[in-house]
Amino acid sequence: MSLEVVQVPVTDVDKAKSFYTDQLGFALDHDVEYIPGIRVVQLTPPGSATSIVIGTGMTSMAAGSLEGLQLVVADMESTRAELLRRGAVISDVQDMGGIAFAFFSDPDGNRWVIQEKTPPDVKEAFQR
């Protein structure tokens, strides 16, 4: 089994689509309305095997209720700098036991985490 798509509840699909593509650089996989009232917009973060889906008529989750979706990056500083350059609002980097994290929210308040890949020496410390 592999997790390939996660629904993200939003109020304004076009505003969210713009945020994820323009500010975060997600690829737009498709934007279709299968039947009236059900619009599916699938977006994939750069380098990810897992996508997100936003749209209408798909979920009963409240917009902005998701938290803790995590994007793992090789280089926190360059990723954060690029997202800031694109206009995203990203927190300062926080060091949590040798692992760097930063945080942001989409226009509806769904909360995301950026984590820098865990260095091998930190992984070994956690396994002890």
Image (spheres, rainbow, N blue to C red):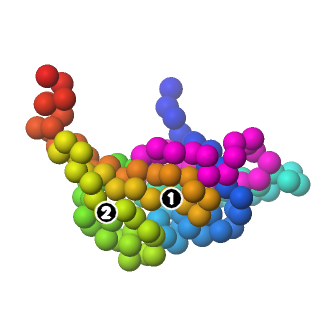
21 relative to 74, above or below: below
Q: Where is residue 19 in the image (x, y as percent from the top left)?
A: 56, 67
Residue type for callout 1: Ser
Residue at 65% across / 68% down in the picture?
Answer: 15
Packing grade of label 2 (10 A; few <14, some 14-19, many >=20) is few
Segment tinted magenta in the rendering? 47-70
The residue most toward the left is 121
Report the front residue among 76 and 102. 102
The residue most toward the right is 36
Q: Is residue 41 visible?
A: yes
Q: Can residue 29 be seen in this view?
A: no
Residue type for callout 2: Asp
Q: Do the residues labelled 1 and 2 touch (CB within 8 Å)?
A: no
Q: Specify the quadrant of the image occupied by residue 20.
A: bottom right
Q: Position of residue 54 (x, y in %)?
A: 66, 53
Residue at 24% across / 58% down in the picture?
Answer: 75
The residue singled out by tag 2 in the image is: 92
Q: Specify the quadrant of the image occupied by residue 106.
A: bottom right
The residue singled out by tag 1 in the image is: 105
Of mark 1 and mark 2, the one earlier in the sequence is 2
